Image (spheres, grey):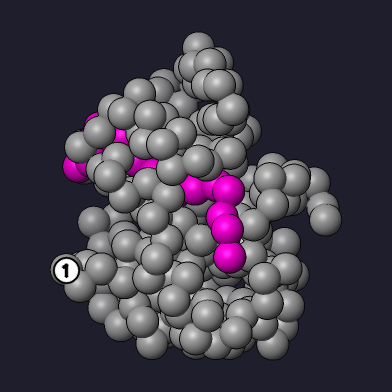
Amino acid sequence: MKLCMDLHTHTISSGHAYSTLQENIAAARAMGLDILGMSDHGPGIPGGPDSIYFRNFKCIPRSYGDLRLLCGVEANIMDYEGRLDLENSVLEKVDYVIASMHTLCVPPGTMAENTAASVRAMQNPLVRILGHPDDSRYPLDREEIVLAAKEERVAIEINNSSLHPKSARKGGRENILELLELCARHRVYVLLGTDSHISYTIGHFEESLELLSEVDFPEELVLNTRPDNLNWILGERL
């Protein structure tokens, strides 16, 4: 399976990543990607950029040879009501929004609380991707999550970083396998993301692809496989 885009990547602006935007662009071009998405953390993460950072994306060129650049955000879910760390007036100015739970922003709650937070975040019409719902530290009713993603037309992220042996997240492999089974059963789109915090991992989805192959996941449900699937992520419908 050939993948053409990586939309979950970070630059030094996230405060705990290690490559510049230019370095990430060079890495994406070297990997032969068609589309690179920059998705730095919102300000809820310590060291993350202030909202003005996301308001000024107009100054960034969006084409680099054959590579198209998108400027998005990984917004942090801040409470069990699903509120994000950036106002919609800011989120409207970025290309796409990933919503994710991080322990630095919201403590793990009960399964009901974590699930409610994720579902309510997806109900924000500006959220297009639910980031890494694969962490056992945040117990989730994953079938409810997948059904909500289908209802709200949000992609479920398959996060390659969650499969790293040193990942802070717990239970990545078994939780991703469950997500894949549920997404296949309910015909819900997934988006593979590297969650790169350094340029060397951009476009490297090997661990995720191994799991997709293991469960024979339908290729037509993987949004990364075709550049025109970007229309769905940006708000249009397939």
Amino acid residing under circle 1: Lys
Q: Nearer the viewer, residue 113 or 40?
A: 40
Tell me the quarter of the picture where residue 220 sits: bottom right
Query: On the picture, is 18 further left or further right than 62?
Result: left
Q: Disc 1 marks which residue?
A: 166
Image quarter (top left, top right, bottom left or bottom right) of the C terminus? bottom right
Q: Residue 67, position in %: x, y?
A: 55, 30
Image quarter (top left, top right, bottom left or bottom right) of the N terminus? bottom right
Query: On the picture, is 205 further left or further right than 216?
Result: left
Q: Residue at x 52, y 80 (%)?
A: 213
Q: Residue 191, position in %: x, y?
A: 57, 60
Mark 1 crowdedness (10 Å alpha carbons): few <14, some 14-19, many ≥20: few
Extreme residue toward the left, this view: 166
Q: Residue at x 34, y 41 (%)?
A: 10
**Residue 16 is inside the magenta segment:** yes
Q: Nearer the viewer, residue 120 or 57?
A: 57
Q: Residue at x 31, y 50 (%)?
A: 201
Using the image, determine if residue 130 lies above or below residue 210: above
Q: Residue 140, position in %: x, y?
A: 45, 82
**Residue 214 is inside the magenta segment:** no
Q: Residue 226, position in %: x, y?
A: 69, 52
Q: Residue at x 57, y 39 (%)?
A: 35
Magenta part of the chain: 1-17
Tell me the quarter of the picture where residue 16 sits: top left
Query: On the picture, is 55 further left or further right than 189?
Result: left
